[in-house]
Amino acid sequence: MLKTNLFRALLIPAAVLALTACGGEDDSTSTTSASPTTDPTTASSSVPPAAATGKSDKELCETANKISMDLRQSLLDAVSAGQEPTTEMFQEIFTGLATEFATLAASGNTDSEVTAALTAYSAEAGKAASAADLEAADNPTFEKATDAAIEACQKAGVEVDL
């Protein structure tokens, strides 16, 4: 199911991207909307002092969504350039999700539901990254971790697309 959800989540935007590439204006709008938020850079650089003051749940969720979208965009860019999605591409994405979300979760409050959900999601993404094939990544535990992260962020008032 994860493979199906991942493909659906990635191929629909790829189709939209391909259609908007003809118009020209929409590409600059997409690029512009991805550029202004610099939270992932800030999140990565602020990890060491996280124990003193953790990021709010809203900040964590916004950054998680940005990380997810950036990694998804890298796959969309490859597909738009004519490359076929490979197991290695997906493993790179899962590795990025695992490392970025672990770093992000470490910057949150230790008693936060969002922090716990992002930590669990990171662990499952790490397992998916080290799997021999994509089918191994399609498991109920990863799906449950994804749902928990989405629900925790919804409680914090942020819609995420993981």
Image (cartoon, rainbow, N blue to C red):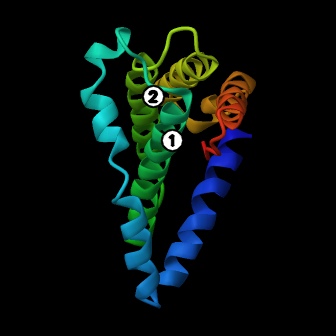
* Residue 36 image offset from top left, x and y in percent: 35, 58
Q: Secondary structure at mark 2?
A: helix
* Residue 106 image offset from top left, x and y in percent: 41, 17
Spatial CA distance of label 1 from label 2 is 12 Å
Q: Residue at x 64, y 18 (%)?
A: 113
Q: Secondary structure at mark 1?
A: helix
Q: Residue at x 43, y 75 (%)?
A: 29
Say above or below: 94 vs 82.
Answer: above
Task: Specify the amino acid type for callout 2.
Answer: Phe
Task: Give the position of the C terminus as an image quadrant.
Answer: top right
Number of marks in the rendered image: 2
Q: Residue at x 46, y 19 (%)?
A: 108
Question: Which of the pair 116/123 is nearer the observer?
Answer: 116
For this view, does 57 lie left or right of residue 100?
right
For this view, does 124 lie left or right of residue 79?
right
* Residue 130 image offset from top left, x and y in percent: 46, 24
Q: Which residue is mark 2?
A: 101
Give the mark, 1 or 2, whose residue is nearer the N terminus.
1
Question: Which of the pair 120/57 is nearer the observer?
Answer: 57
Say above or below: 134 vs 35.
Answer: above
Q: Residue at x 49, y 31 (%)?
A: 60
* Residue 65 image offset from top left, x and y in percent: 52, 44
**CA neighbours of label 2 inside 10 A, class few (<14), some (14 to 19), many (20+):** many
Question: Which of the pair 18/135 is nearer the observer?
Answer: 18
For this view, does 38 lie left or right of residue 26?
left
Task: Specify the amino acid type for callout 1.
Answer: Glu
**CA neighbours of label 1 inside 10 A, class few (<14), some (14 to 19), many (20+):** many
Q: Nearer the viewer, mark 1 or mark 2?
A: 1
Q: In the image, which disc is placed on residue 62?
A: 1
Q: In the image, which disc is placed on residue 121?
A: none
